[in-house]
Amino acid sequence: MQMLEHVCSSKRAQMKIQQMAFMLVAVMIFFGMVALVYFTISIKGLQDKAEILAEEDGRRMARQLAGTPELAYTVRDGCDSCLDLDKAFQLSTINSYAEDLWNLDYLMIERISPSFPDQKCTSPANNYPNGCNEIEIIAPKRGLSGTKTAFVALVRWDDSIGGSPGAYRYEFGRIHVLERELGS
Amino acid sequence: MSKRGYEFSFAWIFTLFIGAAVIAAAIMIATQIVGMKQAERDAARGLEIGVLLTPVETALEDARFAKIIVPDETILFNEVREERPGNPFGSQRIGASIKPGFNAEWKPLSGVQSTFHNKYIFTPTNETYAEESFYVLAKPLKLPFKIADLIIIWGGQEKFCFTNPPVEVKAELLELNMTNIYVSNCPTGPEVRNICFGTTCGGGGISVAINSDHTGKIVKDGKTLHYVESFGTDRYGLMYAAIFSDPEIYERQVSRLMAHAGKLEEIYQRKANSFGSSCYSSNAMSTALGNYKSHTESIASGSGGISTATEARNLFAKAEGVNNANAGACLLF
């Protein structure tokens, strides 16, 4: 009789231990899930913050790029946002220069007015300056969504105006900039 | 005889053991989360400072002074990597560390650093501390065309006393009215650094010698730093950089700037060639640019930036050669 009681009590204790173990596992899973939700929200918040900063930088950069030594028109004072189209074109012909210098995934200068054929500028022998409207300085490294633009005055040397040797001609255009993707 | 005692069942021992393990895990996770949040704040601050420096840079104007207000005590980390194959412009890496709350240990650098290849930041040390604000002075460097902006940053703790500066320097300092920069009524104390022009400065001061050949030297912390004047109206960008900056940072940045100048020459060389023969007689521009490039590249490939007065003089002479060739109707820059 005593033996039977001992066996029943032992079985009850085992049941209790099992219940407790299940309970503890459930508690751990619950904490794990809470932590997972917290980290998801937290990492999303961090990613959003980083993207906002990158976007802000991209927008500023689009405006500021016209003033960088590689692109700025510096022949005459008083034209802060003028971009030297000849320098931009030469820059586009130097392999990897712009990729090494700027943290960008895409950089392109678009000539809006006067209008030119809708083509990429490739070489003076082929179509620059009078047969093209796009100077692609950095070819797109990813999809172009998120590209920032800023309007700029473009200046280029034109040896057909003002007699010999020529003069600088002003155009109107737009700069397209896509910030380098975070973590790349 | 009965002995009284406590009997711990297996269930109790098991519960205590698992409970302790759960609490220990919770503490460990909480510590990790606090550390992660700190790293996140530091990384964001570093990136913010980097982004804020972009509008401070100059366009066509001369010097610019700005203040970056930080809400908490912050250390700005400045790391410069010189140019090398695969990274022709070198790297400017900046990071920040915000003082943690609750008297927690202030780790040196927990957040990720931001990397830029087109920025040149000069700071008094690798780790610049600011309680409330960082002060930023941006100066263009033109040799003879614009190479980059020199961004000089110091914290609220450093004070600089300019003694007997040339009229031009004094006028600019008064005009910019920069915080913690004095040209008269200098405060005293260990945080004040004296900058003596034309004479040797004792007691940890900085001695500046401006030569008539558009070069000069700064003796700071036992090291001699050479500089060349910038073309245009704002001539002393590199001099200010050498005065405010840690000597090693200065030398590395000058090396990067020379590499950048050599790369810019490629653009101007191609632009000059596209102008055609009606613009430049006897390849004067092309030759001047070629000489300039070989000299800047030689400085960049050596150690310590502009290492001698002769090197500084030659650099200015080569830049002057390009500037003289850039005359007439077809101006390159």
Image (spheres, rainbow, N blue to C red):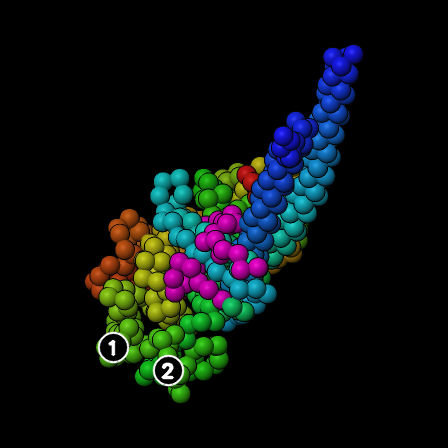
Question: Does dot 2 land on a helix, a strand or a loop?
Answer: loop
In this rendering, would B277 be left or right of A179?
A: left
Extreme residue toward the front, this view: B1
Checking the image for residue B188, the label placed there is 2
**Amino acid on which the number 2 mark rests in the picture:** Thr
Label 1 and label 2: CA atoms lie apart by 14 Å
**Amino acid on which the number 1 mark rests in the picture:** Gly
Among the two numbered marks 1 and 2 on one chain, the one whose residue lies closer to the N terminus? 2
In this rendering, would A119 be left or right of B105?
A: right
Does label 2 lie on the same chain as label 1?
yes
Which residue occupies 24% across, 66% down? B222
Q: Is residue B110 magenta?
A: yes
Q: Chain of mark 2?
A: B
| Image coordinates for residue A36, horizontal then vertical, percent | 69, 37
Which residue occupies 46% across, 44% down? A100
Characterize the magenta stretch by its predominant secondary structure.
Answer: loop
Extreme residue toward the bottom, this view: B185
Which residue occupies 29% across, 79% down? B197
Which residue occupies 57% across, 59% down? B102
The magenta stretch spans which residues?
B101-130
| Image coordinates for residue A27, horizontal then vertical, percent | 73, 34
Q: Is residue A180 visible?
A: yes
As displayed, is residue B107 above or below residue B196? above
Task: Read off the residue under disc 1.
Answer: B202
- Which class describes the residues within 10 Å of circle 1: few (<14), some (14-19), or many (20+)? few
- Judged by depth in the image, the label closer to the viewer, 1 or 2, is 2
Q: Chain of mark 1?
A: B
| Image coordinates for residue A28, horizontal then vertical, percent | 69, 33
Between A20 and B108, the one lying in front of the other is A20
Between B325 and A108, the one lying in front of the other is A108
